[in-house]
Image (tube, helix red, strand yellow):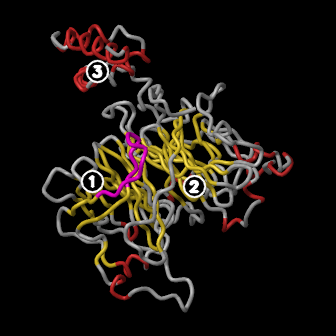
Amino acid sequence: MDPQDQGEAMTENKTGMLALLPDDMLANILRRLPPRGLAMSRCVCKSWLAVINAHRLLRADLLPLSLAGFFMNFDNFYISEFLTPRSDIPSISGKQDYLPKAGSLSWGYIDGHCNGLVLVNSYDNNGDKNRYVLNPATRWLAPLPPCPPPPMEIKGTFQVEYLAYDPTESIDFEFEVVSITHFGRMRKPGDTHDHEIEQSEWPPSVFILDVFSSTTRQWEERSFAQEGNSSMGTVAGMRQNWPSDRQNAVYLRGALYVHLQNDCVMRISLSNDKYTVIKPPLGIEVEDYPKIYLGKSCKGIYCASIKRRCSVQVWNLDESGCQMEWVLIHDRDLSKWLLKHKLEYPRCYGIQGPWALQDINYYYDGYYSDHDLEASADERIEWSLQASEDEKFTWSSDDEYGCYGGYMEIIGFHPWKEIIFLSESVTRGLAYHLSSSKVEVLGNICPLGFVNELGKNEQILISCFPYTPCWLTQTTDEGS
């Protein structure tokens, strides 16, 4: 017998003998393994995977069960910044200087996250683009080949890729990447499009998508049938809504929820190849640049919107009935609190808070000098401000504190607590507790040197992704 076949036969015999044991007894045996061995045991067979998951044998600190921070992309900064709770020894680095072909002129840009893995665009010294699926905690990575052209040729479109990964369900750390078409506006007066295509329904009843599988390491076309009769409109109608980098995605219980143009959400079930269109919550105003964020928290899928500069609205997706619907769970105007605590002050640099940016762009090349970053005396405010547990907000229309002149943006949700993280005028971060209306000031979120890049009105926070580190060691041959 071939040595390899003999080894496989011995493995099958041993696992077959263990399969005769009751699940509880097998679990008692497996829990004695070290974390890495236990993680590898999940890949032996589906029955072992089920036992390990059912008995929750994996150490909680190895699974993505904590919020390590947020990857943040700022306009005109080519490297993603990392906002994280301050620590003397940061466990996660937002830098990607360890990527293949990294050099003095290379840089990496994160544009997606799912349960500890991120999608990263890396550019080497020659300006050549490389795409990876990366685990920043363990520095494991897998190259992502270029996506093929979309199956349906439509002018003025581009593809956006979304990551789907669940370490508690996948065998051998399998992930998928889904490519979805986005539509641009006609930029030139002479630009023309096929009239028949422009008036066709979007998405079609059978939606053909390119999906990359880490198992086959290839892109393949997959057909997804529509459930329900809801449509997002026509191709021409989609062009009226300019795509935003904040139209992100959430992966939960085998389904990928993608925030698309006109603020509809597409729920793509990767297990049965079906999709559903979910209309946006009632009351969301469709604008050219909507401040809407799709995320997940302790009760599943959430959607948040900022209206009138600093009014926070939050919805939770109810999937219990035959038809999915958004339920408004929070609607508060924070202007009174912002004015009361004098957070209309100008931007502050060099002041520490409980959270901090790693300022990757600034320290990447050391271009800026420290004297450009000093805050004036009027800008030095305390970062310990927060609403006490028993402080009662007054939501009246009186003008006791004046008029708030800043603006707020959504950074993201806490994955397991009803907390939404906010950016106040791209100046300081806030943690807003939805259940108690408690507000905590996290600290400065404006990168060092950012004030020198663009004018004040052009300094934009483009996109943000919560990062939940996964410390499991991948067992595939791919990686660094």
Label 1 – label 2 distance at C-alpha: 26 Å
The x, y position of residue 63, in whole percent, is: 41, 28
Per the image, label 3 sits on a secondary structure element best described as: helix
Q: How many marks?
A: 3
Per the image, label 2 sits on a secondary structure element best described as: strand
- Counting residues from the start of the chain, the first of labels 3 and 1 encountered is 3
Q: Which residues lie in the magenta part?
A: 211-222
Which quarter of the picture shows residue 151? bottom left
Per the image, label 1 sits on a secondary structure element best described as: strand
Nearer-the-camera pick, 60 or 106? 106
The x, y position of residue 103, in whole percent, is: 74, 43
Amino acid at circle 3: Ile
Q: Which residue is mark 2?
A: 424
Residue displayed at 56% across by 44% down: 441
Amino acid at circle 1: Leu
For disc 2, the neighbor class at 10 Å (few under 14, some 14 to 19, many from 20) is: many
- Counting residues from the start of the chain, the first of labels 1 and 2 encountered is 1
Q: Nearer the viewer, mark 1 or mark 2?
A: 1
Q: Which mark is residue 52?
A: 3
The x, y position of residue 201, in whole percent, is: 28, 77
Q: Which residue is mark 1?
A: 317
